[in-house]
Amino acid sequence: MHFTVAIAGRPNVGKSTLFNRLVGKRLALVDDTPGVTRDRRPGAARIGDIRFEVIDTAGLEEADAASLEGRMRGQTEQAILDADVTLFLIDARAGITPLDQSFATQLRRAGKPVVLVANKVEGRKGDEGFFEAYSMGFGEPIPISAEHGEGMADLRDALVSAIGEDKAYGRTEPEPLDEDTEEGFDPDAFDMDAETAIPEYDPKRPLRIAIVGRPNAGKSTLINRMVGEERLLTGPEAGITRDSIAVEWEWQSRPVRLHDTAGMRRKARVQEKLEKLSVADALRSIQYAEVVIVVFDATISFEKQDLHIVDLIAREGRAPVLAFNKWDMVEDKQKLLSELHEKTERLLPQLRGLRTVTLSGQTGKGIDRLMEAVMDVDRTWNARVSTAQLNKWLDGVQGHHLPPAVAGRRIRFKYITQAKTRPPTFVAQCNMPEALPASYERYLLNDLRATFKLPGVPLRLFLRKGNNPYKPKKDRRIG
């Protein structure tokens, strides 16, 4: 993508709706409430045969620079300066307002190309506002309906005219591969006899990291310190972040995409529709991440909601790292550190060996240790154990602790292999899988984790019943 487009305008004119239309996905939160978007959200957009990066911005408002609205405006102004061309949206149904006129003057001062876009022109209600837009002095406005997709061809032509054909039709990058998810794995369809070979761990491949936690834990501040700029909106107010914002970064020559997310409160406290949308966006970021950094406020860590978030990450099969933030505010560091380690082992037994790091997002101290833990857990999450090693282990573990007998019959394991990684997933064959107690399954998983050094990541174990060798082949069924 060879050029960047910023979408600007006063609140509630349809900027996020147009952003979603251009990227072809519902990435930005959309609601009738003004001021839903607060941070700059980038996305890969396409109209017909042109591709570009588009940036959704907060609504331009007159406000004091120190206030939340003022800081939001600062983010929008930075997006306009970084972009090659700005789409200045107006609401054709509402007509031109004094706020529109004020920011038209600001856009002229920026000295960047501007395409005036009259949104919400479906029907005849927007005709008056559309013709009024000529008075803005940006030439002919482009009539569109972001909600219904009308006028996209005219918008494409206007962008090409504003940016120039050479830049608009530059060589495009290949589209990114779909995110890896755990969905679709069927243990019954897995071929037990075929050991899947995967490439060695590549320490230079791009990595997706989601930053999650309760409100006001310091997630956005941490990302700003990591990337070395005020990329995300921060402040003392709780719940500033609403959208899940992706920020490109590089750590030791490795491309990293950091996803900032909204603070996740207890479900019972989430009442407003907008907060529900924000939490759903955060959950989506967890599903598509590889490593999830859970940011705890070290001064009030391990509340019930913290445990719920970590458990959710484990059930999603992502690789977690605990970051105890605001460590610079702790007085007796050694005492609190011992307490945190004890609580981690006691309260999160399903993730034994969970990586924990103390840091300060405000000062940046501990970020290198955090990233080393992230790389370590990602390597474990991608680990593969050979079938020969697994079956040797299975013989030993059964000899040390025999599976229980059910109705006079001993449960016996015959074979085990690793079906997939991300997270490490194993398929074992035994004669009565439905009768195996959960306690023995936990015993197997804990021994697997300890023997093959797989600490701090979720493990999956699927049980299958083997074929009866004495049944005629035509009557055999895969259990």
Image: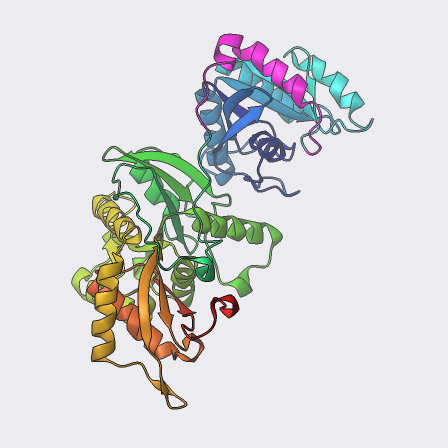
Q: Nearer the viewer, residue 210 or 411?
A: 411
Tell me how the rendering is colored.
rainbow
Query: Measured from the top left, where is residue 279 in percent x and y?
Result: 51, 53
Residue that lies at the very extreme toward the bottom in this rendered image: 408
Asked whether, in this view, residue 392 is left or right of residue 2, the answer is left
Q: Does the magenta stretch include residue 171?
A: yes
Q: Which residue is drawn at 21% across and 59% down?
A: 331
Left or right: residue 104 versus residue 426 is right
For image coordinates 35% across by 74% down, the residue present is 441
Measuring from the top left, give residue 95's x and y in whole percent.
73, 25
Q: Is residue 150 above or below residue 212?
A: above
Instruction: Choose top left, top right, bottom left or bottom right for residue 312.
Output: bottom left
- The outermost residue toward the left is 334
Q: Residue at x 35, y 67 (%)?
A: 428
Instruction: Identify which residue is drawn at 27% across, 59% down.
Output: 387
Give, as a single range, the part of the protein colored magenta: 147-174
Looking at the rendered structure, the number of numbered marks drawn on it comes to: 0
The percent coordinates of residue 127 (x first, y second) are 79, 22
Q: Which residue occupies the foreground of this view, 308 or 385?
A: 385
Q: Can residue 454 be seen in this view?
A: no
Q: Where is residue 325 in the image (x, y as percent from the top left)?
A: 30, 53
- Res. 201 in view: yes
In this orientation, which residue lies closer to the viewer: 7 or 52?
52
Q: In this view, does 91 lie above or below 306?
A: above
138 relative to 186, above or below: above
Q: Which of 18 and 406 is in front in this view?
A: 406
Residue 401 is a magenta residue: no
